[in-house]
Image: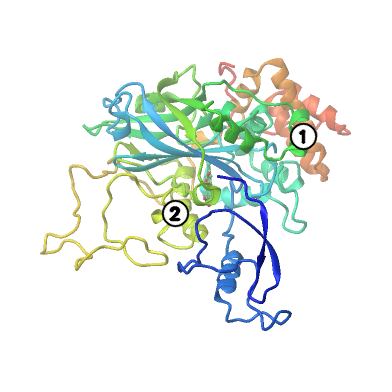
Amino acid sequence: ATIADLKIQRGEGGETHQIAEGDTPVLTTAQGTPVADDQNSLKAGLRGPTLIEDSHFREKIFHFDHERIPERVVHARGYGAHGFFEPYESLSDITAADLFQRAGEKTEVFVRFSTVAGNKGSADLARDVRGFAVKFYTKEGNWDLVGNNIPVFFIQDAIKFPDLIHAAKQEPDRGFPQAQTAHDNFWDFISLSPESINMALWIMSDRTIPRSFRFMEGFGVHTFRFVNAEGKATFVKFHWKPKLGLQSVVWNEAVKTNGADPDFHRRDLWDAIGSGDFPEWELGLQLFDEDFADQFPFDVLDATKIIPEEMVPVRKVGRLVLDRVVDNFFAETEQVAFMTQNVVPGIDFTNDPLLQGRNFSYLDTQLKRLGGPNFTHIPVNAPRCPFAHFQQDGHMAMHNPKGRVNYEPNSFGLGPREDPKRGFKTYPEEVSGTKRRARAELFADHYSQARQFYLSQTEPEQTHIKDAFVFELSKVETPEIRARMVAHLLTVDQALGEKVADGLGLPSVPKPATPARPIIADLPP
Ligand code: HEM
């Protein structure tokens, strides 16, 4: 394209305008009518009022007025890119999922990275968990692996999610802070929810200030199920390992970078892909069976726990490459609708109560955010395999059933029918029990893995964790909340608790928190 210059043009009344010159396609209204003048609204006389008859002006302003949709209630700030996944080997012995059947066969993906707590316009290098959401457009439907860059989570049961997020986001009276963990409400909630302590250690580590998306790990977090063609199930935990390795910045760099360039992470991804330096991750699997789950000292349905890689090694089974930026941020990154309940034949859920709750939440939130039931018609959300169903109508319907028939079974042999051989079958897990609001007893140990994580860190990493606690808790104004957090840290590791108490200048070191279950002393660091 040539760079346009300015030229003088005469208006309808002979008056002069300066307009951009150039040989471009004709501008039209949304109805397709060519536009003669896009610089001046229709007026009664040269200096008169604007006329409501000006339908081009009204259409243009009306559309502008409706440009914003609700931002995501969490993970509002994100950045996406297209790419592909390719398995190194066939996994047909453990899963019937089509994308894992043939070595080297590519499946298209869309990935969105995000921060959790910050609003859409917040800064990239806030200390926060990062979302790592992958939509696989497989030949048997879309599979969404909606993960984070930390392998554990704050809470064990989805019923606590609204409280966690209310406490983490800006306080309702003052409307700040917009994107950081350093405030009373957040630490109040954490200190009163011992199940969050393991995650609290992880978020005070360098993982929550990643150098860029390209240097982050990703995790499916929950235990999922693979099911093979014979119906045999294997438990699976999903990992993404960055080819560039895991790297973070230090807090000082994060603060300066946020000030100098709040778009640092999205710019990094855009520039890397644009210059052909395609970021890459390997998909790793931890695979185990019921026997392992039964002898593991924690419940594999508890999302606040990891399965140490020393116990179940991570098997690398394929690679993810991001090689194409979006054409339009809103159309793709903003409108992409991830949903944990999007699984395909060969992949199934477990009874993890956080996952079960998520499976309800994501459909509900997309309906609200994208304005109705037809968000799967948006190209970034539509399957790229053939699909056929009798869902119809609703706001913005783009592809209704064609012809006479919109139901099944029908006598006319028209339209799609179910197929017991090919269709998705839920794993026939036996379920029994008394209805009750409860958690299994193994969910009650909140400190053993927090200690294991802290002790597994190198000395500089431990110092960063300590410094982060001192910095974040020093912003907390309520002395009781600071003391309660230090009490938890003393139980995790006495030296850590004492150092944080000292850094905060607490008048005395509080009593350590009492664990609900004895801490397992001999977990390998
Ligand atoms: C959005 C991950 C727990 C509700 C997201 C996104 C990610 C994510 C990555 C952003 C998706 C995107 O980029 O568009 C996780 C992980 C969780 C977790 C790893 C725990 C292991 C929960 C729970 C709930 C929940 C327990 C609710 C019960 C939501 C909602 C959104 C969201 C409402 C916004 C979705 C949208 O409007 O597009 N989550 N989440 N999440 N998550 Fe979660």
Regarding mark 2 in the picture, which secondary structure is present there?
A: helix
Check the picture and name the quadrant holding the C terminus. top right
Camera-side residue: 225 or 177? Answer: 177
Measuring from the top left, give residue 43's x and y in whole percent: 66, 79
Three-letter residue code for mark 1:
Val
Q: Which residue is mark 2?
A: 363
Query: Does residue 451 sit above or below 179 in this rendering?
Result: above
Q: Picture quarter containing residue 196?
A: top right
Camera-side residue: 366 or 53? Answer: 53
Sequence-wise, the earlier of marks 1 and 2 is 1
The label shown at residue 40 is none
Q: Which residue is mark 1?
A: 255
Q: Residue at x 27, y 27 (%)?
A: 92
Nearer the viewer's eye, disc 1 or disc 2?
A: 1
Measuring from the top left, give residue 192's x and y in whole percent: 68, 43
Q: How is the image coloured?
A: rainbow
Asked whether, in this view, residue 436 is left or right of residue 193, the answer is: left
Query: Does residue 383 sit above or below 274 in this rendering?
Result: below
Crowding near pointer 1: few (<14 within 10 Å), some, many (20+)?
some
Q: Residue at x 48, y 55 (%)?
A: 366
Crowding near pointer 2: few (<14 within 10 Å), some, many (20+)?
some
Regarding mark 1 in the picture, which secondary structure is present there?
A: helix
Q: Picture quarter containing residue 397?
A: bottom left
Q: Residue at x 21, y 32 (%)?
A: 230
Three-letter residue code for mark 2:
Leu
